């Protein structure tokens, strides 16, 4: 998946740190690494893909974040073709793709060959004359740096907090608005006898539900992911997971009363979706060699995050072109 850029020389180029291994960070890291730059990709999670997430418990699996990816842009279609050939994507319908065996696997090929640090939370960053330095939040992890460029591909509120010391950038990031969403994962103890694999609710609490086990490559017992409404999630953001589980399950059973849950749990996505995007592909301070981006720049779709990642990589390459000749 890492194709060498025609201008890559094999010589050491600018060093780039990218915080966040979601779709935007992975895409930027893939392009820059293939172009001959030294890239270090860091994520606080053990997984990849951000909200392209799959929860696995025993024999159960739930795509409890983004349920699918819709693409139309030629660059995204080409990427999905590569991922399909790699065995981590499958087309469910025209322009709609799923990860295999779960959504969390969709973008894994983009990480091949990267200098990737997972399970590392960056607590602070600072710019010195030598470059950017990153401070992990545990004493066991040494400070990282220096880097010529810093790209922050985290959700907008987290990116703004991390870059609070650089207000020209953080103030711009703070203009993007992200919305939360609670999700419920349910395995019933019997067939719910639903004709459709997607249920749209007219409800004050529930938004929609998607059956997970019938997706291509899944299997296992019948399982459902129930998404709460954005407005309800926002109003109940700080309730306990148990309270959210009980409220969402009660709502689900009010619509589908048959069957008791064999397994049920709830998950809160604090920054689930983009409610109001920034309107440009990234925020940049060229003097500091600092950029921030993600889906929150352009819109609520995974393709928006990929576009932001491509744009950030292109900007770094434009600044770095003399060093790569």
Image (cartoon, rainbow, N blue to C red):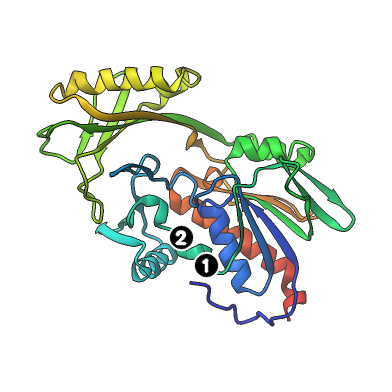
- Quarter residue 257 falls in: top left
Q: Secondary structure at mark 2?
A: helix
The residue under the point 78% across, 61% down is 148
Give left or right: position of 68 versus 117.
left
Which residue is at the front of the view, 119 or 197? Answer: 119
**108 in relation to 61, above or below:** below
The residue under the point 12% across, 24% down is 258
Give left or right: position of 16 versus 200.
right
How far is the residue under mark 1 from the one under mark 2?
Answer: 7 Å
Which residue is at the front of the view, 241 or 22? Answer: 241
Rendered image: mark on residue 112: 1
Residue 318 x %, y %: 69, 68
Q: Secondary structure at mark 1?
A: loop
**44 in relation to 264, above or below:** below
Residue 35 x %, y %: 63, 74
Give left or right: position of 120 versus 306.
right
Residue 310 appears in view? no
Q: Quadrant of the C terminus?
A: bottom right
Which residue is at the front of the view, 179 or 184? Answer: 184
Residue 261 appears in view? yes
Residue 204 x %, y %: 31, 18
Which residue is at the front of the view, 258 or 2? Answer: 258
Give the farthest residue toward the right: 129
- Marks 1 and 2 close (CB-CB < 8 Å): yes
Rendered image: mark on residue 108: 2
């Amino acid at each position: 998946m890492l194709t060498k850029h025609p201008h890559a020389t094999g010589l050491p180029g600018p060093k780039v740190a990218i915080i966040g291994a979601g779709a935007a960070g992975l895409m930027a890291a893939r392009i820059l690494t293939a172009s001959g730059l030294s890239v270090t990709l860091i994520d606080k999670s053990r997984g990849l893909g951000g909200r392209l997430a799959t929860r696995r418990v025993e024999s159960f699996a739930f795509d409890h974040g983004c349920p699918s990816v819709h693409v139309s842009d030629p660059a995204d279609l080409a990427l999905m073709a590569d991922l399909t050939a790699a065995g981590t994507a499958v087309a469910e319908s025209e322009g709609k793709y799923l990860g295999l065996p779960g959504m969390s696997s969709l973008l894994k090929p983009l990480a091949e060959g990267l200098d990737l640090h997972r399970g590392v939370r960056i607590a602070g960053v600072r710019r010195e004359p030598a470059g950017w330095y990153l401070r992990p939040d545990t004493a066991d992890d040494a400070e990282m740096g220096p880097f010529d460029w810093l790209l922050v591909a985290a959700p907008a509120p987290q990116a703004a907090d991390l870059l609070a010391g650089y207000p020209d950038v953080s103030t711009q990031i703070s203009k993007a608005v992200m919305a939360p969403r609670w999700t419920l994962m349910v395995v019933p103890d019997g067939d719910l006898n639903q004709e459709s694999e997607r249920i749209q609710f007219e409800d004050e609490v529930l938004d929609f539900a998607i059956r997970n086990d019938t997706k291509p490559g899944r299997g296992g017992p019948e399982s459902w992911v129930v998404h709460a409404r954005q407005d309800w999630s926002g109003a109940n953001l700080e309730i306990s997971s148990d309270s959210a589980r009980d409220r969402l399950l009660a709502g689900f059973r009010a619509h589908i009363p048959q069957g008791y849950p064999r397994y049920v749990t709830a998950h809160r996505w604090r920054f689930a979706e983009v409610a109001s995007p920034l309107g440009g592909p990234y925020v940049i301070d060229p003097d500091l060699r600092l950029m921030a981006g993600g889906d929150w720049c352009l819109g609520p779709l995974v393709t928006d995050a990929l576009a932001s990642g491509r744009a950030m990589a292109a900007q770094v390459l434009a600044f770095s072109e003399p060093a790569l000749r």
